[in-house]
Amino acid sequence: MIRVSFKKRDGLARTGILETEGMLPVRLPAVTECTEFFPALAALAGANLPLCAPKATVNQFPPEAGIQPVLIHPQLDNRAQSGDCVMVAGWHIAMTNPRTYIDWLIGLKEKTPVDTAWYAPASALPSTAAILCYSGFDLFDYTGVDLKSAQGRFCTPEGDFQKDALVGGICSCPGCNAGNLQEHNRHALRQELALVTRFIAMGQLRDLVESRCRMDAAQVAIVRHLDRNYAFMERVQPIARAGVMRANSGESLQRAEVQRFAERVIGRYVPPKTDVAVLLPCSAKKPYSLSQSHRKFQQAIGGRAHELIVTSPLGLVPRELETVYPAGHYDVPVTGYWDAEECAVIADILTRYLRKHPYRRIIAHLEGGALKVAQMAAGQCGITLEYSCTEHPAGNTALNALDAALAGERKIRDDRLHGMISYQFNCDTDTKGTTLRGHFPEVFYSRNNVQIFSIDTGTGMLRPTLDGWTVIPEGYRVHIDDFIPEGDILAPGVVSADPAIRDGDEVLIVGPRALGTGRAALPADEMQRSRRGIAVHVRKIKRI
């Protein structure tokens, strides 16, 4: 009897517990002696079929029924059920062809229950553990590192070396101290998985993967191919994280959270009613309004124009969205230089936005790479920029020029709430009559002295109260069965969910006998495909 429960998700990666009768529970992700955990492995025949084998060949070796782990293969129909452990034989070979790796991975993930543990036999090395967990694998064995030991290779997360590295002072583990290569390699794998587990718990596994993959071209290609499958990757990424999003490499431009922010700014966000915009540079401090430079910009603008921050890797951040993840959470190396790819990606985002939202006047208060991007976008849109500076935007001369450029323009209504609702909930709603209290960014919105929204200071996202949901006419609803929740809602209790819901989204719980508000613990797809685990963390329930 197998039991799998997942505790924390970070994209495809998970932490959790795997239990089976007669064995101590294993904390996932983990490496273990899998033949002891799954005795049937020792007697399996015909299971190690190449992943590239045609269906006719695969059908000649049907997997045995009723044993764990359940063999899955690109050419096999799904036989796994919720709570099983599934095994992909020969996965270590897949890493030699990154494009095929992604095709097989997505195909297998789409047809396998989401609440199954994934076992990759003979695949894990200290140098591959991070990318394997990032791809959604949970369980590994020692076969890969033991083979390296037999070949006289010294394994590290950065790659493997000749056996003489054992006495080179690279590592001081018990295996190295005893001159035992096999024990060192096993220890290095366990240590790397412990580090991966910590990064999953922090919601920052992508940062570790970007640093680890630099030493292996195939891993860089895998990350890039995964990012190109935006629809697949975006669906499993949480809507927000409380920690810093490090954008330290070129791959950061294409990570799902970055692409999603840009797509929502262009496709969902509704700007205030004005025909004057000012393009501003970003700041190291987040949210931008807390920085000294942006305080000066806001004072010079005086509410007479819509403020748009041009930044890498996000592209464009309207002032109303500066607290929202990842706009209020990213960190990027500041060099003053934007390369050609960076400029092209960000100029495309700005171009698409300006085509959808034409302004009568666009004032560029920029310098360096951000100014170049604005000029590229203006050229593609066929518009003429006005310039209040071309260097030192926070200098007195530039600020005075910006103030003078806006002379005679009327002030626009400051409605941060409207912009945030449109971005987060994809609706254009009337926010007249709302009042604000608190100190930015920890603020609360009320209407008729009744609180309707607050801002989560960890993620910058809006948290609606039950009264606040009346402002959001549709969407982000989770429909539950005929019961009154007395705690968090489990996946089996979910009848349906809005497909737009992602892990971490604020949702309205709707049932025949109760209404509630809470935060999604799973994306909508997984809520309906799972048979175990928490679907929604409930904040408040009201009996109907």
Image (cartoon, rainbow, N blue to C red):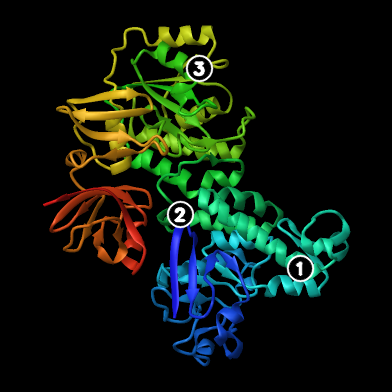
Check residue 153 in the rendering and tell me which mark sits there, or answer none: none
In the foreground, 334 or 38: 38
Which is more foreground, mark 1 or mark 2? Answer: 1
In the foreground, 204 or 472: 204
Which is more foreground, mark 1 or mark 3? Answer: 1
Q: Tell me the residue that label 1 is attached to.
A: 183
Inspect this view and state whether residue 270 appears.
no
Q: CA distance from mark 1 to mark 3?
A: 54 Å
Q: Tell me the residue that label 3 is attached to.
A: 292
Residue type beneath disc 3? Gln
x and y percent of residue 109 in the render?
A: 45, 68
Residue type beneath disc 1? Glu
In the foreground, 349 or 533: 533
Check residue 230 in the rendering and tell me which mark sits there, or answer none: 2
Question: Judging from the image, what secondary structure is the residue with disc 2 in?
Answer: helix
**103 up-or-down from 236: above or below:** below
Q: CA distance from mark 1 to mark 2?
A: 40 Å
x and y percent of residue 151 in the render?
A: 81, 73
Label 2 Cα crowd, 10 Å radius (few <14 / some 14-19 / many 20+):
some
**125 up-or-down from 271: above or below:** below
